[in-house]
Image (spheres, rainbow, N blue to C red):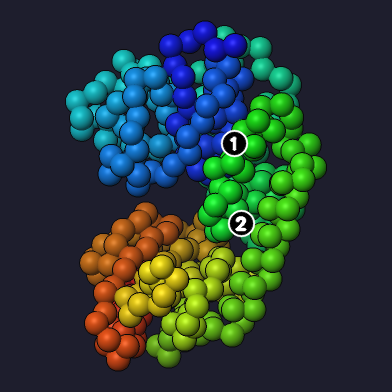
Amino acid sequence: MNLSKYTRIVTHDDLDGVVSAAIVSIATGIERCYFTGPVTIFEGRASTTEEDIVCDLPCPVRFGMWFDHHSGNLADIELRGLEVKEIPGNFSPAPSCARVVYEYYRDKVQFPSFIEDTVARTDRVDSFDYRTMEQWREPLPERFLADSIIAVSRDGKNYHRYLKKLVSLLRNSSMEEALADVDVKAAMESFRDLEERSLKLIEQDTRFHDDDTEHEIAIIDLTRHNRKPGILRNLAFILHPEALAVLLIQNQYKGGRKTNDLTFSMSLSFLMNTREHNKDVGEIMRAMNLGDGHPGAGSGRLPCSSKNEMLKARDHTVGSILKMWKEFG
Ligand SMILES: [Mn+2]
């Protein structure tokens, strides 16, 4: 039973958000969950109240408790003149928000014994702590669950229902046991389909710029397609293990129809976790006035008025990205 003054959990729509919600739910008895992304909160498009416990997201204007581990969000709190110690909840720069929530409640609540393991696995997934292809591809329960969320998010309509189901599964059982659920199995299966289709697309549509003799940036160019293909861009590192980054170029689709506008999304290989470097993908997106991001990943958009202009803009942008990439050293 829920005896607290809080009535709802507002959490990030990823595995860390789901696990955070499961832990809050065990501790408080609250079962109502709302899932959203950081941008929605940041732009004030999610309506929240003083009855909400917010996890793994920027701190909204109205909230009851706030749990987080992103230092950027802490900086925003301070800019607002708020003292983090006075905010109900907990902040620490931990590898996952699940750990921040767990640290807060562990002395107050008797948790099931599997929670310790669930939190450790969430740490690993959320901090993207992979250094080799083998580690990244290792078939672990936390990866399967995170992947299942990606697969369901791609097809949209059952997304919230699926995330709710995961919260209740992870409240009552270990990650390992949750994998036996029929909905989880189906989502894992659709992730495997997505992987297979992605690898085929990457095989057909990946190239390197002529000036990129070391093959540092694998460019997946999907602009020739007329229907929007679903793709997992990081699988490019399987086919091109020498690449240090992947750049995905797609047209923007509106209501299923291809437009001339381009979208760019780029991320670093996990190879970059093991070496000293100054590459900053977010800075590339900002400097070129395309969009935003952080050092490891970023994305942006370029409006074009005709197909011809789009093709020119594409080649010009790829050239500029490569030039800037090299300048970082
Ligand atoms: Mn997180």
Residue 275 visible in rendering: yes
Quick one: label 1 or label 2, which is nearer the N terminus?
2
Which mark is in front, 1 or 2?
1
Q: Report the side of 122 relative to 137 (left or right).
A: left
Q: Position of residue 10 (x, y in %)?
A: 45, 31
- Dot 2: element: helix
Q: Nearer the viewer, residue 200 or 236?
A: 200
Q: What type is the residue that disc 2 sits on?
A: Ala
Q: Quadrant of residue 21?
A: top right
Q: Secondary structure at mark 1?
A: helix
Q: What distance separates the C-alpha of mark 1 from that of mark 2?
A: 15 Å
Residue to which mark 2 is pinned: 151
Residue 35 to residue 132: above or below: above
Give 109 or 194, whichever is nearer the viewer.
Answer: 194
- Drawn side of residue 29 relative to residue 94, left or right: right
Query: Residue 198, position in %: x, y?
Result: 61, 72
Q: Position of residue 268 (x, y in %)?
A: 47, 63
Horizontally, is 257 left or right of 62 in the view?
right
Q: Is residue 111 above or below residue 271?
A: above
Q: Nearer the viewer, residue 145 or 103?
A: 145
Instruction: Specify few, some or many for label 2: CA neighbours under 10 Å numbering under 14, 14-19, or 20 or more.
Output: many
Image quarter (top left, top right, bottom left or bottom right) of the N terminus: top right
**Number of disc labels:** 2
